[in-house]
Amino acid sequence: MSIGEFFAMGGYARYVWPSYALVAAAIILNIVWARRALQRARTEARRRVAMKDSAT
Amino acid sequence: MAWVWFHRLGSPPYIYGLAARLTPWFAWPAALLIIGGLYGGLVASSPDYQQGEGYRIMYVHAPSAWMSLMVYTTMAISAAVGLIWRIKVAHAVAASCAALGASFTFAALATGSLWGAPMWGTYWEWDPRLTFELILLFQFLGYMALRSAIDDVQRADRVSAVLAVVGVVNVPIIHYSVEWWNSLHQTASVMKLAKPTMPLEMLIPLLMMFLGFTLLFVALLLVRLRAEVLTRERSAAWIRDVVNA
């Protein structure tokens, strides 16, 4: 099988590749979202701890 | 004595640390399984005798659909645990599921649509399985909307948990829809008690994708759970140790 044939997917390229792209996007976005949520929560927690320290 | 582990699991600082330690043990196997499954599904397996290369959408469609049901079930069970035993961490798990579930339900619907177009001759049909899966997407979105509409976290937990628990009836409906109704959608090829109706060279990459998606879900859930616990426990003393570590 040549590279060209592989990407042509037997004529189904316009259905197969968008499907894979969509699911890849879902996976990548979920990884990014999860990490960003944790990062944000940590920054916020750090800020609150620092605020408490400066108050006392 | 046997309840000690259960009580520990209810303790936010313990859960926070445990989730952090466990994440790589799920994330790396998930990555390997998905990469292996992609190779098996796209390259190593032969074309289907009826659908040619078009059937390869299955390797991303079926695991996404499986993920949508798995995430909802997890969300509903933890919501129920939160309601019954008033465990805050359980509510945090439920809340961490919603966005994940919504995105994979959308992916299942969209890839199904892209698969339906060449094989059924239509992108959409008000077929039972498709319709109930669409309802599942609205359930996730409704759950998220409901949570964001209530400011008080504990009230949001309780109200949204009731919604999640009630909505779980849709999970068996989606699963059995292809048997209960005369559906355009094919019946199960893997998730059934009898022998799967699929050659091994197709079944193995598909199972790798199923397992990979399951582990990916756990890894993502663990990261989201830490964020959720950290936000909820903002005033607790243990936060200081975590932040400074």
Image (tube, coloured by chain):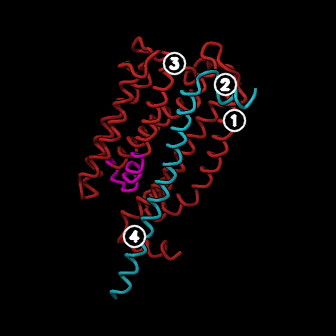
In terms of sequence position, does the residue under pointer 2 or pointer 3 come before the other?
3
Q: Position of residue B40 (x, y in %)?
A: 69, 32
Residue B1 visible within the image: no
Circles 4 and 1: CB atoms closer than 8 Å: no
| Dot 4 crowding, Cα within 10 Å, few <14, some 14–19, many 20+ | some
Image position of B10 with respect to B187: above or below? below
How far is disc 2 from disc 3 in space, using C-alphas? 20 Å
Q: Which of the numbered marks, if any, corresponds to residue A20?
A: none
Label 1 sits on a secondary structure element that is helix
How far is disc 4 from disc 3 in space, using C-alphas? 49 Å
Return the residue at label 1: B39
User: The disc labelled 2 sits on which kind of residue?
Assistant: Met
Return the residue at label 4: A44
Label 2 sits on a secondary structure element that is helix
Find the magenta span and give its range.
B83-99
| Dot 1 crowding, Cα within 10 Å, few <14, some 14–19, many 20+ | few
Return the residue at label 3: B118
Residue B149 visible within the image: yes
Q: Position of residue A43 (x, y in %)?
A: 43, 70
Label 4 sits on a secondary structure element that is helix
